[in-house]
Image (cartoon, rainbow, N blue to C red):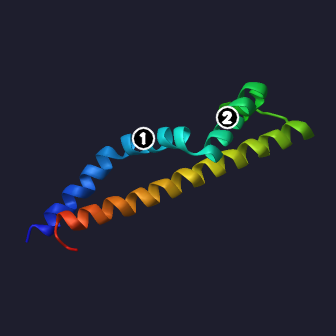
Amino acid sequence: MNEPFLFQNLSERITELFPEIDSDTTTKLLHTNEEYQKLHQRKKELLEQCPFITAVMYGDGPVSLNTEEHKKFVDYLNIVINLENIERMQLYFRGHMDGFSYLKKIEAI
């Protein structure tokens, strides 16, 4: 009888808490995951060394890249994809742990 309410309540809570969960996840990865740390550092370095990347990503006018700039931009995009993959995997595992805890709480397992 209370299960649909509990599920809805959980869904609303997760929606409200997701920005904090996401932030906590990336912070934890920065402190505990060596691969993530290296990728994050490389991304930061590329943005500092290559201001054209910001222009390509967030600018509003035409942008032209030479061969070397294009290579660095592709490198940047690959780094971003790898960082996001690590974050998604961590969130996936977090979801499994939270789901298991929730099922125990409602005595479904």
Q: Which structural element holds mark 2?
A: helix
- The residue labelled by disc 2 is 41
Is residue 22 placed above or below 69 in the rendered structure? below
Depth check, front residue: 62 or 90: 90
Amino acid type of disc 2? Gln
Report the side of 78 relative to 109 (left or right). Answer: right
The quarter holding residue 108 reads: bottom left
Question: In the figure, residue 73 lies in which quadrant?
Answer: top right
Q: What is the quadrant of the C terminus in the image? A: bottom left
Q: Disc 2 versus disc 1: distance between alpha carbons?
A: 18 Å
Q: Which mark is residue 37?
A: none
Left or right: 48 as drawn, with respect to 109: right
Question: Can you give x and y, in whole percent of width and height, for residue 11 in the image?
Answer: 27, 57
- Residue drawn at (7%, 72%) of the image: 1
Q: In x, y percent, where is residue 90?
A: 49, 54
2 and 1 marks in contact (CB < 8 Å): no
